[in-house]
């Protein structure tokens, strides 16, 4: 039973207190209603995960991705693979059980085709899972440059609030400052980093090293510099953005930006959006590390199946065992086996009852 109450928290607390006094009444556990739907085969494990992601979605891209999973598309895809592999396993079982009798000559060929088809589709999903994981968790964009070039001011301008302390003194920022925001429907975490220079202060050195390490792992880097023509950095990667900082101090370079006046900020936002939108194409239906691990395990087993089928010995029993391993990995993924540990993690993020 679920109650919709009006008014402030005092009313809610009073109703909860009265309910707790009734024999046989207890509060629902987080995600309990959804768990019941799963246990009664109304939802699959991947659909439950899609619902959890939908509840947590902060941007349009996250909502769309969560809906694709919640709608059952991933479940249907994996179920289709399972059907192909069950067919292949059945053909192998016939070969094993009736080895001394006449069986179709093309059994191995059909098994190979079924396995190859599934493997190709799994590889396609694995190729795009990094993108879908990023959409789910968020892209990271690091702002880099020498001290006092305007990084923190730019971060504040992009965030629309004073997230970072700004000062005319070099080296003000030492720890990495993170600001999460929505850019073009994509979840983005902006990173304001310590100014890059040869520092003598031990604390500043630690901040600079952390900045370099985090920036190297970011999805995109925005470099602020005094002269874009002479700029170079070992951290520079493909698609990274290099801009002249502090346009408000007189630089009118078309490739510049000023967080103080806002000059060039809109153009920078559009560039970041375009780059990340391009990187978001080809996202997989699989969205979690658990999915990646299950698909990887299945792919390894299926590749071994193909190797065994193409070998001269062609030991059917070994192919069958590898096929069973692949099926087990896929069944774990959609929650047909080994589901309890996954459920505890998923439902921990649900509100009571839902």
Image (cartoon, grey):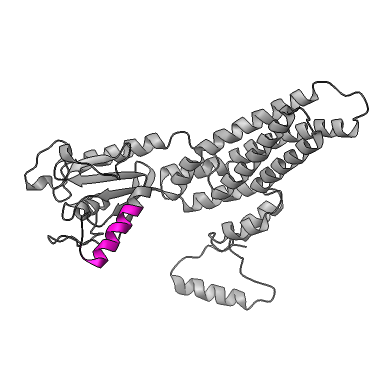
What residue occupies the far front of the structure in this picture? Answer: 312
User: At x 76% / y 36%, what residue is drawn?
Assistant: 319
Q: Quadrant of the N terminus?
A: bottom right
User: At x 41% / y 46%, what residue is drawn?
Assistant: 59
What residue occupies the far bottom of the structure in this picture? Answer: 21
What residue occupies the far right of the structure in this picture? Answer: 101
Does residue 177 appear anywhere in the picture? no
Residue extent of the magenta highlight: 200-213
Magenta span: predominant SS is helix
Q: Nearer the viewer, residue 323 or 85?
A: 323
User: At x 33% / y 43%, what residue is drawn?
Assistant: 220
Q: Quadrant of residue 35?
A: bottom right
Left or right placement of residue 272 versus residue 63 in this view: left
Q: Quadrant of residue 91?
A: top right
Does residue 102 appear anywhere in the picture? yes
Left or right placement of residue 153 versus residue 293 in this view: left
Q: Quadrant of the C terminus?
A: bottom right
Q: Nearer the viewer, residue 27 or 48?
A: 48
Residue 90 point in image, percent of width and height: 81, 33
Residue 111 point in image, percent of width and height: 75, 28
Q: Is residue 4 magenta?
A: no
Residue 338 point in image, percent of width and height: 69, 54
Residue 168 point in image, percent of width and height: 12, 60
Left or right placement of residue 85 versus residue 232 in this view: right
Q: Nearer the viewer, residue 279 or 204?
A: 204
């Amino acid at each position: 039973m679920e109650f919709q109450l009006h008014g402030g928290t005092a009313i809610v607390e009073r109703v909860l207190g009265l309910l707790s006094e009734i024999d046989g009444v207890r509060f629902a556990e987080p995600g309990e209603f959804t768990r019941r739907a799963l246990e009664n085969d109304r939802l699959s494990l991947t659909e439950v995960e899609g619902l959890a992601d939908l509840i947590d979605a902060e941007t349009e891209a996250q909502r769309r991705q969560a809906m694709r999973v919640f709608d059952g598309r991933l479940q249907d895809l994996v179920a289709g693979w399972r059907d192909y592999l069950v067919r292949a396993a059945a053909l192998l079982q016939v070969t094993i059980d009736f080895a001394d009798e006449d069986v179709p000559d093309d059994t191995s060929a059909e098994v190979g085709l079924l396995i190859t088809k599934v493997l190709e589709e799994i590889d396609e999903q694995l190729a795009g899972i990094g993108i879908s994981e990023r959409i789910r968790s968020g892209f990271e964009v690091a702002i880099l440059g020498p001290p006092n070039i305007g990084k923190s001011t730019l971060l504040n301008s992009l965030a629309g609030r004073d997230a970072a302390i700004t000062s005319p003194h070099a080296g003000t920022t030492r720890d990495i400052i993170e600001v999460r925001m929505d850019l073009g429907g994509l979840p983005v975490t902006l990173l304001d980093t310590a100014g890059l220079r040869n520092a003598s202060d031990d604390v500043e050195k630690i901040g600079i090293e952390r900045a370099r390490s985090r920036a190297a792992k970011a999805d995109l880097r925005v470099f602020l510099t005094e002269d874009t023509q002479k700029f170079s950095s070992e951290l520079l990667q493909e698609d990274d953005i290099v801009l002249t900082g502090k346009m408000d101090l007189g630089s009118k370079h078309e490739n510049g930006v000023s967080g103080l006046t806002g000059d060039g900020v809109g153009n920078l936002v559009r560039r970041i959006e375009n780059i990340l939108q391009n990187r978001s194409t080809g996202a997989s239906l699989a969205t979690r590390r658990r999915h990646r691990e299950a698909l990887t395990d299945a792919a390894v087993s299926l590749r071994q199946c193909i190797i065994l089928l193409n070998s001269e010995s062609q030991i059917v029993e070994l192919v069958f065992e590898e096929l069973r391993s692949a099926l087990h990995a896929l069944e774990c993924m959609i929650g047909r086996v080994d589901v309890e540990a996954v459920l505890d993690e998923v439902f921990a993020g649900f509100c009571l009852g839902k």
